[in-house]
Image (cartoon, rainbow, N blue to C red):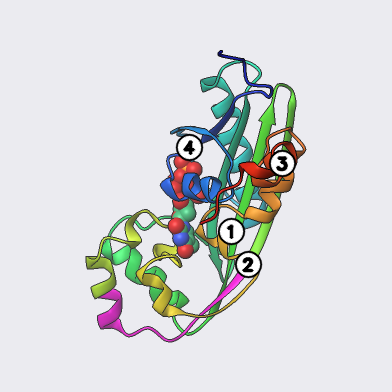
């Protein structure tokens, strides 16, 4: 017999397949829809303020697309070097400028997550430092040709071919990919949305192994 879900429906307001995969990885059942807002940086705006503002705006826009009372999650990831915010590269030249500036240096990846339900909205932020080995000009060109950098902040993907550039990471790997999982699980739990841990409490035998 059909029974209504006990908790509010949960939506991921994001076009990012990575964010959906990360939620699935920790057992968060969700629906996903794309949600577009103006992501331009305001004059004089710092990276932290920018990422938190955009994340909040994505969640609020997402609430308009979701049914009343739904829990909505949105996130934003930016790469920051020398106080410059690197979004997604516009073209090959833009990507080359980005990767040249990251080559042989440490940059910061800032990811914010917002969860909203009704009047309540909470925003958290996780900062991660990523160090790149020096990258040759020919590698930068070849990397662009793979298609991977195009839709990634900073023009690389740590979870993909771009992993060959990463010498060291200090912080949250999943935050660099787009969603800090430990922090997101805690935040969601405070909104009554469970990952595998919550469901295990309800049904200890309901877990499957990877
Ligand atoms: C640095 C880095 C970023 N990224 C991705 C995460 C984000 O999807 C993207 C940054 O752009 P975002 O604007 O944060 O996200 P998005 O446009 O992909 O999706 P939406 O706004 O709809 O939620 O870069 C990686 O996948 N790997 C990486 O190593």
Give the SS element for disc 3: helix
Looking at this view, is 89 or 5 the one in front? 5
Mark 4 and mark 3: span between their CA atoms? 35 Å
How crowded pointer 1 is (Cα within 10 Å; few <14, some 14-19, many 20+) is rated as many
User: Which label lies toward us, 4 or 2?
Assistant: 2
- The reply, left or right, for residue 116 in relation to residue 164 is right
Which of marks 3 and 4 precedes in the sequence? 4
Residue occupying the point 65% across, 40% down = 114
Q: Which residue is disc 4 drawn over? A: 38
Mark 3 packing: few (<14 Cα in 10 Å), some, or many (20+)? some
Mark 2 or 1: in front is 1
What residue is drawn where x is 70% and y is 46%?
197
Label 3 vs label 1: CA separation? 22 Å
Give the mark, 2 or 1, whose residue is nearer the N terminus.
Answer: 2
Where on the picture, by quarter, is residue 154?
bottom left
Query: Residue 128, labelled with which disc?
Result: 2
Q: Residues within 10 Å of mark 4 (few under 14, many from 20)?
A: few
Q: Residue 207: where, in percent of width, then height?
A: 60, 46
Q: In this rendering, would 208 be left or right of 161? A: right
Q: Which residue is mark 1?
A: 175
- Report which residue position mark 3 lands on: 198
Name the one closer to the observer, 201 or 27: 201
Say which residue appears at 62% left-offset and 23% top-offset.
70
């Amino acid at each position: 017999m059909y029974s209504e879900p006990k908790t509010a429906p949960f939506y991921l307001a994001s076009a990012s397949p990575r964010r959906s995969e990360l939620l699935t990885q920790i057992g968060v059942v969700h629906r996903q829809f794309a949600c577009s807002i103006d992501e331009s940086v305001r004059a004089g705006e710092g990276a932290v303020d920018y990422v938190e503002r955009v994340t909040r705006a994505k969640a609020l826009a997402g609430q308009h697309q979701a049914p009343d009372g739904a829990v909505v999650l949105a996130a934003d990831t930016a790469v920051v070097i020398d106080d410059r915010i690197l979004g997604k590269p516009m073209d090959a030249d833009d990507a080359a400028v980005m990767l040249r500036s990251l080559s042989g240096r440490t940059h910061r990846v800032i990811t914010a997550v917002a969860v909203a339900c009704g009047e309540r909205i909470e925003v958290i932020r996780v900062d991660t430092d990523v160090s790149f080995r020096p990258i040759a000009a020919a590698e930068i060109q070849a990397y662009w040709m793979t298609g991977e950098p195009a839709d990634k902040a900073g023009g690389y993907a740590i979870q993909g071919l771009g992993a060959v550039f990463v010498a060291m990471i200090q912080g949250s790997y999943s935050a660099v990919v787009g969603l800090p999982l430990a922090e997101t699980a805690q935040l969601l739990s405070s909104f009554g949305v469970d990952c595998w841990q919550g469901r295990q409490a309800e049904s200890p035998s309901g877990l499957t192994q990877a």
